[in-house]
């Protein structure tokens, strides 16, 4: 019989969630450090970028696109609204809310794009272009297979 600590270390070493979250924390730290001068965290940058590229960004559309619970998304949007970067306006009916970047939201996103591009390039170079492309493909495949939406 295997010892409990050996079993736990095997569990941790093979846990998909644990290892994906660990990798995400490592990458997030690199991007957060790079984006710090812009005043954005990587999570905020991602939300602003997603709103910027969506044709009709509603809270529902954005939560599905990001595979994020609506409550969590709303909580993460609050500081963006408070900073005047995102505007939430009534949608076609009372149940929907439209999201758009304000002028200052576009400005802060534009400012953050410079360090984001540099960091993105560094990550690709660190991993190697082929390994990075494989990783992106595998992540896309995994999301498509397990997406709850």
Image (cartoon, rainbow, N blue to C red):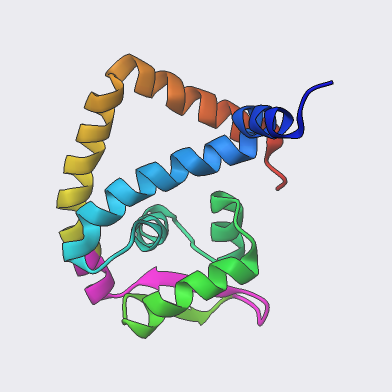
- In the image, is 32 to the left or to the right of 66? left
116 lies above or below 87: above
> x, y (%) of residue 83?
32, 81
120 lies above or below 133: below
Residue at image coords 46%, 79%: 78
Front-most of residues 113 and 22: 22
Report the magenta residues as a range: 92-108
Residue at image coords 66%, 82%: 94
Front-most of residues 68 and 18: 18
Front-most of residues 25 and 6: 6
> x, y (%) of residue 95?
68, 77
56 lies above or below 123: below
> x, y (%) of residue 96?
62, 74
- In the image, is 138 to the left or to the right of 69? left
Residue at image coords 23%, 75%: 104
Residue at image coords 64%, 27%: 14
Q: Quadrant of the N terminus?
A: top right
The quarter holding residue 81 reads bottom left
The residue at the far top in this view is 130
Does residue 140 belong to the magenta stretch? Answer: no
> x, y (%) of residue 117?
20, 43
The residue at the far right in this view is 1
């Amino acid at each position: 019989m295997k010892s409990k600590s050996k079993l736990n270390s095997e569990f941790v070493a093979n846990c998909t969630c644990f290892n994906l979250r660990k990798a995400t924390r490592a990458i997030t730290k690199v991007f957060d450090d790079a984006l710090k001068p812009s005043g954005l965290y990587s999570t905020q940058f991602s939300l602003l970028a997603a709103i910027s590229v969506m044709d009709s960004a509603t809270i529902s559309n954005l939560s599905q696109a990001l595979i994020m619970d609506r409550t969590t998304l709303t909580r993460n949007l609050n500081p963006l609204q408070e900073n005047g970067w995102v505007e939430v306006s009534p949608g076609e009916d009372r149940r929907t809310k439209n999201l758009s970047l304000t002028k200052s939201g576009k400005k802060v996103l534009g400012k953050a794009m410079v360090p984001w591009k540099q960091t993105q390039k560094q990550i690709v170079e660190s991993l190697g272009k082929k390994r990075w492309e494989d990783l992106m493909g595998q992540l896309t495949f995994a999301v498509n297979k397990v997406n709850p939406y």
